[in-house]
Image: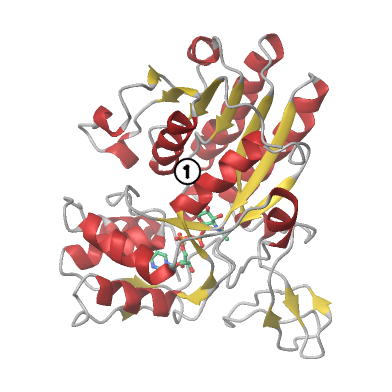
Amino acid sequence: MLGARQGTVLITGGAGFIGRHLAKALLSAGYRVRVLDNFLEQVHGTAPDRSVLAPEVTLIEGDVRDGAAVKRALEGATHVVHLAAEVGVGQSMYAVDHYVSVNDYGTAVLFQALIERPVRRVVVASSMSIYGEGLYRTVEGDVAEGIRRPGLLDPVDAAGRPLVPAPTPEWKNSTLASVYALTKYVQERLTLTLAPAYGMEGVALRLWNVYGPGQALSNPYTGVLAIFASRLHNGQPPMIFEDGLQRRDFVHVGDVVQAFVLALEHPAAPGNVYNVASGEHRTVRDVARLLAGAMGRENIDPEITGKVRSGDIRHCIADIGRIQDELGYAPRHDFSEGLAELAAWVAQQQALDRVAEARADLEKRGLVA
Ligand code: UD1
């Protein structure tokens, strides 16, 4: 049985893309919602729009590393959803101190405050990045470690044999390939270690590539669909790394919200990690083409750069059996409808295209080659 929908949920980073959608869903389910957010310029621009949050939300403006702000935000909270994080894989490879500080020290500060003021349940946004390469099988069907060799796009096994990407279940070992992945792993482990030690329930959701209206369009460091949308909106070709045949699972933000609500309420969730995805996978090249079509820009061909971004993995596709079986999760959003919705939203937006700048940033550090 789902829990009584009473209580106050604190969403850290709740003014961001996922947080805003989640705040709305929780308010309509009957929760009170508080948001702790610092309106980071890279995400929100220089003139942040605070009206993205429903008027019923109590907003505490502050950094998750500021213990006093976190304590204020926790007053009266019964549940926490921890979303506050820096989220660019490429950027994490040079802004190392900043990523470790916001993501890991920030989570430490949150738990330091929770020790004194515990809540019932803490749900943390972890990431598929902690798997590194997704699960692979040999052509005979045996599980094998996918190793990315310099000069080869597709991972091979230790003996150099070709492999086939397979849906990745939660039991796959972590092979952390970027600073971002490392920090997400620490966030997840801090939550699952400290919550039960202080009588709280902890749950971690490993999110795949989330997309939908409201995604930061002017942040060139993350979210390939938003980056491509921003390029196309400005009449520019999407820039595809590698050959564009890398595979991901793109999950609509509405389905991610469903997963968070289940993780907050379901009695079977505590102590567990769950993959959150759509269960379908696509190549980056296909999504570039489909998005261009949805935006009426099919005349703009993507630029296939052939370059590899440091920290990127080749394929990671999701096995969502566990969250379906244990929590009753059921993704409802069709991808082409989701793209049409994204395109309609983007058409109403101003999107600053900072992709060339971000690429130059990576190139000058030798992180795209
Ligand atoms: C990564 C993380 C994921 C995290 C997400 C949020 C991994 C394996 N995954 O996803 O957990 O939630 O970031 O930051 O670390 N690409 C282009 N052109 C672009 C931008 C990206 O071709 O302009 C390609 C990338 O090289 C990559 C794919 O698109 O192959 C997806 O990139 P991105 O949206 O940044 O997300 P992931 O790296 O998959």
Residue depicted at 44% across the width and 29% down the height: 27
To which residue does mark 1 refer?
95
Which corner quadrant of the image does residue 312 belong to?
bottom right
* Residue 195 position in % (x across, y down): 75, 26
Helix, strand or loop status at disc 1: loop
How packed mark 1 is, by other alpha carbons closer than 10 Å (few <14, some 14-19, many 20 or more), is: few
> Can you tell me whether the CB of the residue at mark 1 lies under 8 Å from the nearest atom of ligand 1?
no
Q: Is 69 on the left-hand or right-hand side of 182?
A: left
> Residue 190 vs residue 85: left or right?
right
Q: Residue at x 30, y 59 (%)?
A: 342
Looking at the image, which residue sits at the far front? 1
Q: Is residue 153 left or right of residue 349?
A: right
Name the residue at 61% across, 77% down. 150
Q: Position of residue 293 (x, y in %)?
A: 26, 77
Q: Quadrant of the N terminus?
A: top right
Residue 361 % position (x, y): 35, 55
Pick the front one: 212 or 175: 212
